[in-house]
Amino acid sequence: MIKIVSGSRTIGGNCITVYVNKDEYIVLDHGLKFNVFRKYYGMYTQPLDAQELRSLGALPPADVMLNAKAIFISHLHLDHLGSLDYLDLIENGDKNIYIPSKDYYKEVLSEYWRYSWKFVLVPHMSYSKNMLVDVEQSTPKNVKPIKTYHSAYPSYSYIV
């Protein structure tokens, strides 16, 4: 079964669950809904944290990601990546988040975001970023990453 959690009929906010069996699902993307974000925020108004964005519907609910077997991000634009702050809530580190260019996210993007409102989207606990897995290095055997062309490099589609 496939369920569109968010991102239908809009640009941004992509979040899809794919059930791999009766009780387990994976998440494909969990992006920021730009149309909702723009309603509440602008040059002089910024979110306090990612939970505020979730309460307004700009990000998918955290429980969607927390209950997932695994999470796959197609590319590092905000409308698909959204927030990884929920990783701070997973203390045992038993979840894999498959992401294009893990090193770029950890060393460049999250550091660059440190100086903007986007810093609320970044996990802050030291163990959190250990759950990130580079798509090019490893994926489960039931998910096949396919490189795709997009303005964010690298970008992937997934065959589940």
Image (tube, rainbow, N blue to C red):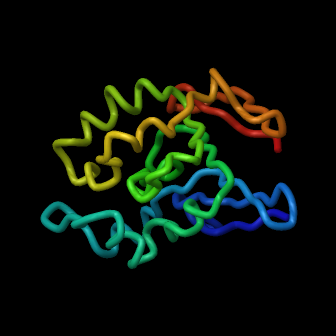
Can you say which quadrant of the picture contains the N terminus?
bottom right
Q: Nearer the viewer, residue 47 or 12?
A: 47
Residue 2: percent from the left, percent from the top? 80, 63
The answer to whether residue 56 is above or below residue 49 is below
Q: Residue at x 42, y 71 (%)?
A: 54
Q: Is residue 119 left or right of residue 132?
A: left
Please state the horizontal and vertical placement of residue 128, each as a whole percent of the image. 41, 44
Residue 151 placement (x, y as % from top left): 52, 31
For this orientation, the residue located farthest to the bottom is 55
134 left or right, relative to 23 = left
Q: In this view, does 87 lie above or below 112?
A: below
Number of numbered tags placed on the structure image: 0
Q: Position of residue 96 (x, y in %)?
A: 59, 42
Q: Residue at left 68%, top 60%?
A: 16
Would you identify the image quadrant in which residue 20 lies? Answer: bottom right
- Going 33% across and 26% down the picture, which residue do you hit? 107
Q: Quadrant for the C terminus, please.
A: top right
| Quadrant of residue 50 within the rendered picture | bottom left
Q: Residue furthest front?
A: 92
**Which of the pair 61/31 is nearer the observer?**
61
